[in-house]
Image (cartoon, coloured by chain):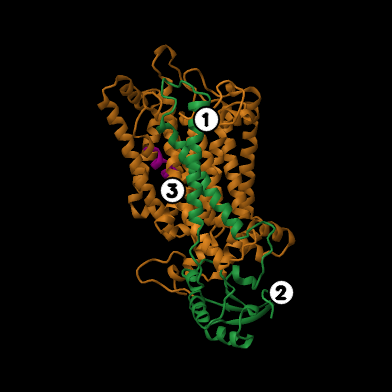
Amino acid sequence: MQVSSPIREPLIHGGKTLHDVSEDICRQVEAKPSTSWMIGFVIALAGLSIGAISVGLLLWDGIGVWGLNKTVGWAWDITNFVWWVGIGHAGTLISAVLLLFRQKWRMSINRAAEAMTIFAVICAAMFPALHMGRLWLGFYWALPLPNTFGSLWVNFNSPLLWDVFAISTYFSVSLVFWYVGLIPDFATIRDRATNKISKAIYGGLAMGWVGGAKHWSRYESISLILAGLATPLVLSVHTIVSMDFATSIIPGWHTTIFPPYFVSGAIFSGFAMVLTLMLITRRVFHLENYVTIQHIELMNIIIIVTGSIVGIAYITEFFIAWYSGVPGEQYAFINRATGPYWWAYATMMTANVISPQLFWIKKIRTSIVSTFILSIIVNIGMWFERFVIIVTSLHRDYLPSSWAMFYPTKHDVGVFLFSLGFFFTAYLLFSKYFPVINMAEVKSILKSDGEKK
Amino acid sequence: MEAGKNYLVGVFEDPDVILNATKSVRKEGVKVHEVFSPHAIHGIDDALGYKMSRLPIVSFLLGFTGTTLALFTITWMLGYDWPMIIGGKNFVSLPPFIPVTFEFTVLLAAHGMVLTFFVVSDLKPWGKPKRFDMRCTDDKYIMAIDLGENHKNKNEISKLLSETGASEVNEKNFE
């Protein structure tokens, strides 16, 4: 069945046939959950439940349960928001941008990465929603609906409103893109299903797909257009997120470098999260032939590129602060590096600038253990990047008498734990009940990019 | 014979074989009902004589509607219905309206196109399509030929399918 190319490494190893692909991917959907999956699920659900207490208290008592004060009015909430949105970006980059560039290696990882995008964006949206305090009124505050609140319409000049539109469009378009890709695979599961319940559920999800040529032709055509729409969309989302800061007049925020800097940071942290998840998924579901060392190496190369862009952005930002000659701006940056939050700045610099450079060494970027450790370090670093930008710029504002420090309360931690618990619970449910690898796409490359048996 | 009832189903093992088979079968004047495959086969739409999908046009028109609608609505809301002074800026200024306009364009273009795809392809959760061979979502490539629509008889078509590389030729009848 498979032929080998003399030039390129095959993308899928193990001499798989079409039927092997269906077997390997559907096996975990059809089998009973494994012990390691159950343990992971219980831990994730525990995090979600403990966090839910904080969310409940936050809604009951108001956002005073967070450690915010008059000077630092935004802290962990917006840090978590930007961090989660950033993580989401890798999924779209893999499924849309790599599709436009015809990078076939995306096919083994796009499904899981897109799932990660969807769950990460839900986690992100949680924070502005919770920060509103009375989230049931959020629709009236955030959407241009006729209302009786005084100023009749929402402010279309505000980046916070752009965010509402950006995040909701991004979420819903990603969801649809992901679902369209899942339809042929649901059909495969439906046709293999032996019991009535799964036949009915996967049958409904497959929407009567049977793989006719006319349908495939339309499917390919809408995938391309969706990728073309999702590419500028994903870039616009983090650009708009960065404008939440860049359009304000806070020193350290008011910079034009923010959009490209945030977008590359988003891809950087997103790829790190894809690696963290894929390395575990690959191991638990025995997908070593589908997600190969080559896939891991290519993702690590993207981490070097985006990590270096982030590093340059940090240095440029510092240089421009000095070069601007604005004392407020200069102080904001000196305070970032040497002030009371120097440790957060040092963590960010080490984790985001130095650690990705280790991937220049081939041994490190092709090793699973070092990739896994570095992927977690990168995500810790990227969380601190947002914390540094937000809190250090705010805590010493224009009026020295109002300078303050931000200390998180247990409910800051609790709500963050809630989002982490949600993310992993959702990802684990996805990986158990949905096909984690796009079978239809992988089948299409077996012949051209596979290897000889 | 009535159309839509009796079919001849050729089962193929390889995408290139079914692609060539489709071309030669159609050259012989046989009308192919549809080809089913576990993944997209490049060139099969040309071989079957299908025209390019017009879904991208749908997407463009809906996107254009989104742009116009968003710009019109925002301008009307902030410029005419309830003007507000925000930082002393003009009531209607284009640059800050662009992000929301862009997002709304993408929103309508993407969702409109996908919904149109579901409707024109008759994909729905309660859909019960004709199944010619259950293996076409796993590892087999299937060519279905409606005997009611063809002048050639069953044996001739069956022979043609075997000659072009079908590993099995089955008959499928729907009541």
Regarding mark 2 in the picture, which secondary structure is present there?
loop
For the point 52% across and 42% down, which residue is it? Answer: A169
Residue A203 drawn at (x, y percent): 67, 60
Both labels 1 and 3 in a single chain: yes
**Predominant secondary structure, magenta span:** helix
Q: Colour of chain A?
A: orange
**For this rendering, which residue is in front, A360 or B55?**
B55
Asked where in the image residue A399 lies, by quadrant, the reply is top left
| Real-space Cα separation, disc 1 to disc 3, in angstroms | 27 Å
Residue indicated by mark 2? B174
| Residue lying furthest top | A401
Residue indicated by mark 3? A231
Q: Nearer the viewer, mark 3 or mark 2?
A: 2
Magenta region, residue range: A261-269
Regarding mark 3 in the picture, which secondary structure is present there?
helix
Q: Amino acid at mark 1?
A: Asp
Residue B167 drawn at (x, y percent): 57, 82
Q: Residues within 10 Å of mark 3 (few under 14, many from 20)?
A: some
- The chain carrying label 2 is B
Answer with mark 1 or mark 3, whichever residue precedes in sequence: 1
Q: Indicate the chain coloured green by its letter.
A: B
**For this rendering, which residue is in front, A182 or B75?**
B75
Q: Amino acid at mark 3?
A: Thr
For the point 44% across and 25% down, which residue is it? Answer: B91
Residue A287 visible in the picture: no
Regarding mark 1 in the picture, which secondary structure is present there?
helix
Residue A370 visible in the picture: yes
Residue A381 drawn at (x, y percent): 42, 38
Does A301 sit above or below residue B160? above
Q: Which label number is shown at residue A77?
A: 1
